[in-house]
Image: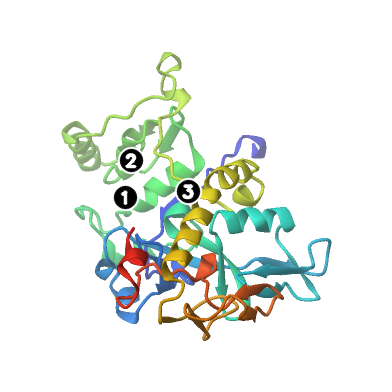
Amino acid sequence: DKARLKYRQLFLEKELGEEDTRGYHHVQLPDGTRRRLTSSELESPTLLPEGVRVFKAGDMTSQEAGATTFSYPFEGRTFHCGQNSHWKTGHDGLERLRQAERLFAVGNTLSYVRFLDEIPTRPLTNIWTDTGIAGYGDPKVYAVQTNTKVIERCILMTTDPGDLVFDPTCGSCTTAYVAEQWGRRWITCDTSRVAITLARQRLMTAVFDYYELARPEEGVGSGFKYKTVPHVTLKSIANNPEIDGIYARLHPAVEKALAELNAALKGHPVQFKVTQGGRSGHFVDFAAPDTAIFTMPAGQVVKINELVEWEVPFAFPADWPEKARDP
């Protein structure tokens, strides 16, 4: 009966360096610094410092022009989605992404910061490269014995807790074993007394984990309490109006700190080379007069002797005055 068929999508954990993590080439350090991963870090993720967050510079555009085809200024530069493309969100959404520090410029492309730990799983497809002979971990009793992982996936994809699983060719009892392990009822049979004896022994001596029921009063048919993982998307941030209030409440403190920093640096014979944004490659000369200005590519006019918000380094240079380096 086709109407009674079930399919439950299964998920696997993402692991840096595997095929499903292509594009995760950047990292954000605990102090907020963002940089590209080194080749050695990509090959051996265990080399990553503690507390870092790996992220991908996600695509911000979709094909065909539309209502969200426009230019957007970011960090003193102007980015356009392309005449035959459109941004995946509107101007308000882009502003929220900026306020949440989720925009990231890679060359001439404006990207979305997609952290690996915010979508740590991937859907299981019909390519099961991890169930081959090389990864066989079960004790081999029969020449045709199926890997437990294969049976487990088949049962989890097509049944729910409390469902009845029938295996008319018991063999080494893998189906009944997995069904019992995952809270499914089961029936199994075999014409061989040897198979039945081995199956009985395997089931009676096995130790199964205990699972908490979702609703104990309803029994195993209510399902289990499962571990959950985050699933943060571009849309969930761009469409979250609470970000506006949070930004409005907290950003004045950032502006105050920036004003105090510029005041502490003003007049000192120190030059600072900017590394990102519209003034990248140019110098901020703190000894320059207030009348000296610099025009960003996006048209924003700033003073040559002052830093703007995105230019502030995460580690202050040693030649800066002590007052400026005071946290």
Find disc 1 in the rendering and name its residue: 148
Query: What residue is shown with label 2?
Result: 178
Left or right for 76, reference 15:
right
Q: Is residue 71 above or below residue 198?
A: below
Q: Where, by quadrant of the figure, is residue 214 drawn?
A: top left
Question: Can see residue 301?
Answer: yes
Q: What's the colour scheme?
A: rainbow
- Residue density around tag 3, few if under 14, some if 14–19, many if 20 or more, within 10 Å: some
Q: Are marks 2 and 1 in contact (CB under 8 Å)?
A: yes
Q: Amino acid at mark 2?
A: Val
Q: Which residue is mark 3?
A: 10
Residue found at the far top of this picture? 217
Mark nearest the camera among 1 and 3 is 3
Label 3 SS: loop
Q: Secondary structure at mark 2?
A: helix
Tell me if 305 is positioned left or right of 155 in this view: right
| Amino acid under disc 1 | Thr
Q: Is residue 149 above or below residue 219?
A: below
Q: Looking at the picture, tell me which residue is in the foreground, 258 or 19.
A: 258
How far is mark 1 from mark 3, CA to CA? Answer: 16 Å
Q: CA distance from mark 2 to mark 3?
A: 16 Å
Considering only order in the chain, which callout, 1 or 2, is on the residue closer to the N terminus? 1
Q: Position of residue 38 (x, y in %)?
A: 35, 79
CA–CA distance between discs 2 and 1?
Answer: 7 Å
**Residue 180 position within the rendered picture, expressed as x and y whole percent measured from the top left:** 32, 33
Q: Secondary structure at mark 1?
A: helix
